[in-house]
Image (cartoon, helix red, strand yellow):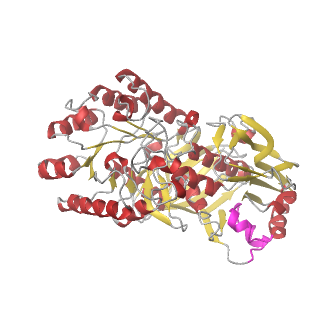
Amino acid sequence: MSVLLLTAPDEALPFDAYLDEVLHSEGWCLHEHRQVTGPVAADELAAHALVVISRGAARRLDPAEVERYLRAGGRAVCIRPPREWGPALGLQPRLAETYATLRDGYVRVCDEHPWLGNFPALDLQLHGEADVYEGGAFEALAWLAGQRGHATPFPAVAATRVGDGVAVTFAFDLAECIVLHHQGRIASASTGADPDANRDGKFTADDLFEGMRDFELRHVPQADVLQELLTRAIAGLTRDLLPLPRLWRFPGAAPALLLLDGDGDSMCPEDMRATVEICERHGGRFTFFLMDEELRDFDADELRAVAERGHGIGPHPRVPLRPTVAEWRSEVTRITADVRALGFEPVSLRMHSCILPGWDEAPRTLAGLGLGLETSFLQGYRYQSGYLNGSALPARFIDRDGRLLDCWEQSTVLGDDTLVTTKTMMPVKSEQECIDLSLELMRELAGRWQGVFHPYFHPINVGGHGRMHTARWLDEVLREGVRLGMPAPSCDAWLAFTQARRAARIADLRWDAGARELHFRLAGEQAADGLTILLPRCDAGEAARVEVDGAPCEITQVAGERAICLDLPAGAELSIRASYA
């Protein structure tokens, strides 16, 4: 049995298929993704444990077949289906011409619902539109809200029993909402109708989100939490049927991850050595983004020795503050070639001053150059810190035509200069305030959000040759990371794990209810050390014994769920049996 995802992208709904990426981000790698091109009968749906129906697919499916599937005991998640589906799903759409749609409102989560206990955040921004349903026989998982914290009686997410089955209906398009959280508005790009939307005098990623962000929610990775709503719905819908395994976000059952990097910006070799020494003291690794000066003046053998010890080397391109896309592309291509000429294969970068023109033009270029991890999304001007793209996880880019790109954004939560200078139009923080904020965000990530703490430290400041001295700050961050169990890989290693996890597949899932045994296979095209599989609770109990290829495997715990950790060789296929009690 598996999960079936149905999508149907078109010109009006180019981001429909991003729902597939949302599922992979949450570790649901056992689903079959099918694009709807013709009729789908109830009998076809019944072959799956659960069906997720995108907005585009719902517009093409026969609602009578979906209802027949549900009444026979099916389970479905319906993403903003046509209003006409409402009555069959226990929802009464508002029929009046006015107040029938909420645009750019909020979601208020019902944490008293049994599926949503200890939900990480209750108030989330809803980018895009939602349908207003006035009533019906449903259980609310979340309500629509016109303002943060002020819930209406209109459901944002509703669970309804339909015959012997259950449906969860999202009143908004989750895929579109997540893309808007991740990439902002096309019109606010440098190539859109309102270039330099925040008027800071340069083309940076925060222009894309001008007018979209709630300052009070800047430290909430809202897109990740919205994805958690879908995960809780899937787990709740299937709990009485079977446990659905999924892949955890980080290697080795880690609760969160620490990603450290910094821009060359006039650093000297002593600054690089000081940064390496502090990181290695705590078992961490650092990624250095180098400008032309460092590539020209540093000893190439020393750079290679740093890379061989597990640290990362990537380009730090300098372009005009308001470049054309062509100017930007030319410079990124040139300096990437220069890094390769020194014998490195860079996979990540940060732009000088975080200059990033266009909407999807930059990640398309980076994917073509083999740069799979972009780090220039920085919540700086008027915000200082936070999750600019609503995510503490690697967020895969999609282009305006609905094509997924082989490039992820790992947004930068804060930088040394964003906190201790006035260039963000915010008050300067003291060294201790910077440390306190960093440690607070790390504890939230490890205990609440399960995400990546990703600051940047200029090595020139770590080494003490810049305008500030940040060695103690970096040391405190690394020390806290060790205490919280947060691994600190280079950008290269983190991207490699992200890609390997994304390529892994769970197949041949079989649940023997009588024996209380779950059987499945795990396969992967790429090697993944420390891959963690969550084995959730179900009505049959918890995983009590696990075997991998017939050998016992230790059970660990992460995020309140039982799990196993294993190394998946490239091209390997593992057979897993979990006994529940």
Between 406 and 144, the one lying in front of the other is 144
Q: Which residues are magenta?
A: 39-62
The quadrant where residue 252 appears: top left
Left or right of residue 233: residue 499 = left
Between 444 and 564, the one lying in front of the other is 444
302 w.r.t. 471: above or below: below
**Which residue appears at 66% of the width and 64% of the height?**
4
The quadrant where residue 476 appears: top left
Left or right of residue 463: residue 246 = right
Residue 108, horizontal then vertical, whole percent: 71, 39
Magenta highlight on residue 46:
yes
**Which residue appears at 48% of the width and 36% of the height?**
383
Between 245 and 548, the one lying in front of the other is 245
Residue 451, horizontal then vertical, whole percent: 49, 41
The answer to whether one can see residue 163 in this image is: no
**Which residue appears at 57% of the width and 44% of the height?**
211
The answer to whether one can see residue 82 in this image is: yes
Magenta highlight on residue 541:
no
Q: How many marks?
A: 0
Residue 500, horizontal then vertical, whole percent: 43, 58
285 w.r.t. 366: above or below: above
Between 172 and 162, the one lying in front of the other is 172
Left or right of residue 237: residue 552 = left
The quadrant where residue 577 appears: bottom right
Image quadrant in which the N terminus is located: bottom right
Q: Residue furthest bottom?
A: 38
Image quadrant in which the C terminus is located: top right
